Structure formats: C-alpha cells, structure tokens
Amino acid sequence: MPRPTAAQLAYGSATVVVSTLAMLLLSQTSTGLGVAVISAAALALGLLVALTVPAPGRRGRPAARAGGAAAPAGARVPEPRKAGAEHPVHH
C-alpha cells in the first residue's frame, strides 16, 4: 500500500478535528459512551476523506530515458514510433 501524501494527511486530520468538534457541540453529549461513538465516527470519516483525496499523478514528471537517467526539465522526449510508420528497405 502506498504511503499517504501530505495532502491526504492534512485533509484527513482536519476532517477528524472539525467533525469531532461539530458532532460534540451538536449532540451535547456528556457521557463517555457518546464521546467514544462520536470519536470513532470522526476517525472513520477522516479515514474516508484521506483515502478519497486524489493522489498526485505522474503528469508532471519527465519520462525516463533508455539509459535510466531522467530527462532534464523542459526537454522534449520523442514519442515511440509505430510499426506501421516504418517503411521496409529493399536492396
């Protein structure tokens, strides 16, 4: 499983804190069981939010070259040629 990104951690943590405070204030519960249920619900909601935040794609990274070295920033990497585009050479 991939490691969570900083954005996923931030959104999940903020969701847990804000939803816990909101639910505690709205429910006005003072029992230990009520606080435990609200805390569990807030943790589940935070986990759901953290997992649904889109992970960064590979769009911004340059393509790797055949030698294993990455292309410099701004370099144009040629697209692979298709087999139909090549013409046979007859000698």
Image (cartoon, rainbow, N blue to C red):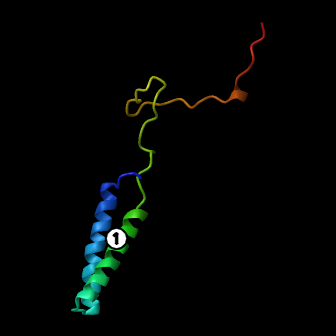
Name the side, left or right, on which 39 lies relative to 2.
left
Q: For mark 1, what is the residue?
A: 46
**Residue 50 falls left or right of residue 22:** right
Front residue of 88/38: it is 38
Name the image quarter holding residue 20.
Answer: bottom left
Residue 6 spot, x, y in % from top left: 30, 56
Dot 1, crowdedness within 10 Å: few (<14), some or many (≥20)? many
Residue drawn at point x = 21 percent, y = 92 percent: 30
Residue 63 at what x, y percent from top left?
46, 34
49 vs 72: above or below: below
In the image, farthest residue toward the right: 90
Q: Residue at x 34, y 60 (%)?
A: 8
The structure residue drawn at horizontal position 73% and vertical position 20%, both measured from the top left corner, is: 87
Q: Amino acid at mark 1?
A: Gly
Instruction: Please indicate whether residue 83 sits to the left or right of residue 49 in the image.
Output: right
State the count of labels: 1
